[in-house]
Image (spheres, rainbow, N blue to C red):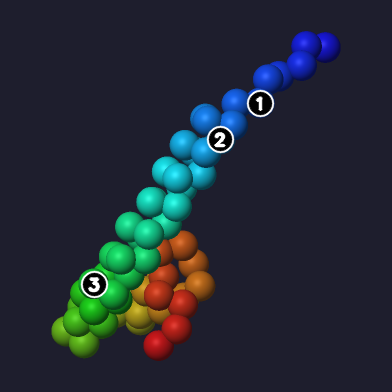
Amino acid sequence: MNDIAFDDGIAGAVIRAAERAADELRAQGSARRTAAEDAHTDYSGAYADRFIEAIFSGAPGGLASR
């Protein structure tokens, strides 16, 4: 079996890219929460309960807490 060479420069670049992505997602959180809460306030109808469950759940994309 061949060894795979580890490249510190590439690993560092991947780490920096992941950190930038995490920062960007954190920065979007407040605006997304506000949009979801506004939609929750104005939303009614057959799917309103499912929408509320989805935005406030621990599911991916959910806001996890009220």
Tag 2 or tag 1, which sits nearer the N-term? 1
Q: Quadrant of residue 54?
A: bottom left
The quarter of the picture where residue 42 lies is bottom left
Q: Residue at x 52, y 30 (%)?
A: 10
The residue pinned by badge 2 equals 11
Q: Name the amino acid, label 1.
A: Phe
Quadrant placement of the N terminus: top right
53 or 16: nearer the eye?
Answer: 16
Task: Give the number of the mark in front: 3 or 1.
Answer: 1
Residue 47 appearing in the image: no
Residue 3 visible in the displayed image: yes
Tally of numbered discs: 3
Q: Amino acid at mark 3?
A: Ala
> Which residue corresponds to the image point at 29% horizontal and 75% vertical from the top-left?
30
Q: Which residue is at 45% across, 52% downward?
A: 19
Q: Which residue is mark 3?
A: 31
The reply to whether callout 1 and callout 2 are in contact (CB within 8 Å) is yes
Q: Earlier in the sequence, mark 3 or mark 2?
A: 2
Q: CA distance from mark 3 to mark 1?
A: 39 Å
Q: Earlier in the sequence, mark 3 or mark 1?
A: 1
Left or right, residue 57 beside residue 29: right
Name which residue type carries label 2.
Answer: Ala
Q: Residues within 10 Å of mark 3 (few under 14, many from 20)?
A: few
Residue at x 40%, y 88% (from the top left corner): 66
Q: Residue furthest left?
A: 42
Name the residue beneath numbered marker 1. 6
Establish if 17 lies above or below 50. Answer: above
Q: Residue furthest front?
A: 9
- Position in image of residue 55 (x %, y %): 37, 74
Q: Which mark is residue 25?
A: none
- In the image, residue 4 sits, relative to residue 60, either above or below, namely above
From the viewer's perspective, tell me whether residue 35 is left or right of residue 54.
left
